[in-house]
C-alpha cells in the first residue's frame, strides 16, 4: 500500500459541496460552492470566508438558498471554482480567481 503526505497536513477526507445562492445588490443571484456546512438542529451552519461576494450579500440581505447539486453536476461545480462575484477580486484571491457576475 502506498502512503502519500498531503500539503497542508490536515484531516481532509472530502465533504459534499453545496451551492449557496444569495442576492446581489441589483437583485441578480450569486452562486458559490462551499463544503463547510452542516446542520445543528434547525440551524444550518455555513463556514464562509470573509472576502466573498456571498458574505457581502449576507450582510445586506440575510437570506440564501443552500442547493445540493447531484454528483453528475461536478463539471459545472468545477467551472464555478475559480469565479467570484466580488469586483474587484480581493488581493488574496487575485492569482486564482476572476470576476464573474453571471455564474448561472
Ligand atoms: C469545492 C469547493 C469548496 C469550497 N468550500 C468553501 C467553504 O466551505 N467556505 C468558503 O468560504 N469558501 C469555499 N470555497 C471557496 C468559494 O467558493 C470562493 O471563495 C468563491 O469565490 C466564493 O464566491 P463569491 O466570492 O462569489 O461569494 C469552496 C470552493 C470550492 C470549489
Image (cartoon, rainbow, N blue to C red):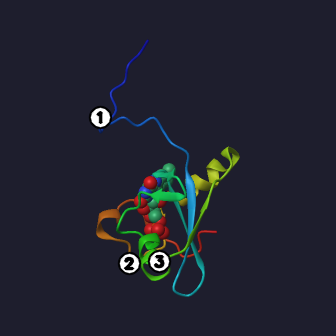
Q: Position of residue 47 (x, y in %)?
A: 41, 57
What residue is at 59 percent from the left and 54 percent from the top?
77
Is the CB atom of the residue marked by disc 3 within 8 angstroms of ligand 1's nearest atom?
Answer: yes
Query: Which residue corresponds to mark 1?
Result: 9
What residue is at 65 percent from the left and 53 percent from the top?
69
Q: Position of residue 11 (x, y in %)?
A: 36, 34
Q: Earlier in the sequence, mark 3 or mark 2?
A: 3
Between disc 2 and disc 1, the foreground one is 1
What residue is at 41 percent from the left and 61 percent from the top?
48
**Residue that protrudes farthest toward the bottom in the picture:** 26
**Residue that protrudes farthest toward the top in the picture:** 1
Q: CA distance from mark 1 to mark 3?
A: 33 Å
In the picture, which quadrant includes the N terminus?
Answer: top left
Query: Which residue corresponds to mark 2?
Result: 88
Q: Earlier in the sequence, mark 2 or mark 1?
A: 1
Rate crowding at label 3 as few (under 14), some (14 to 19) or many (20 or more) other CA atoms within 10 Å.
Answer: many
Query: Which residue corresponds to mark 3?
Result: 57
Amino acid at each position: 500500500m502506498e502512503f502519500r503526505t498531503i500539503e497542508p497536513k490536515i484531516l481532509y477526507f472530502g465533504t459534499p459541496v453545496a451551492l449557496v445562492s444569495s442576492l446581489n445588490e441589483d437583485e441578480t443571484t450569486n452562486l458559490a460552492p462551499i463544503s463547510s456546512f452542516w446542520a445543528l438542529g434547525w440551524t444550518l451552519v455555513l463556514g464562509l470566508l470573509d472576502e466573498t461576494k456571498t458574505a457581502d450579500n449576507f450582510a445586506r440581505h440575510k437570506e440564501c438558498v443552500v442547493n445540493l447539486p447531484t454528483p453528475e453536476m461536478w463539471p459545472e461545480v468545477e467551472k464555478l471554482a475559480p469565479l467570484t462575484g466580488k469586483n474587484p477580486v480581493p488581493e488574496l484571491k487575485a492569482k486564482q480567481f476572476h470576476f464573474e457576475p453571471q455564474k448561472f
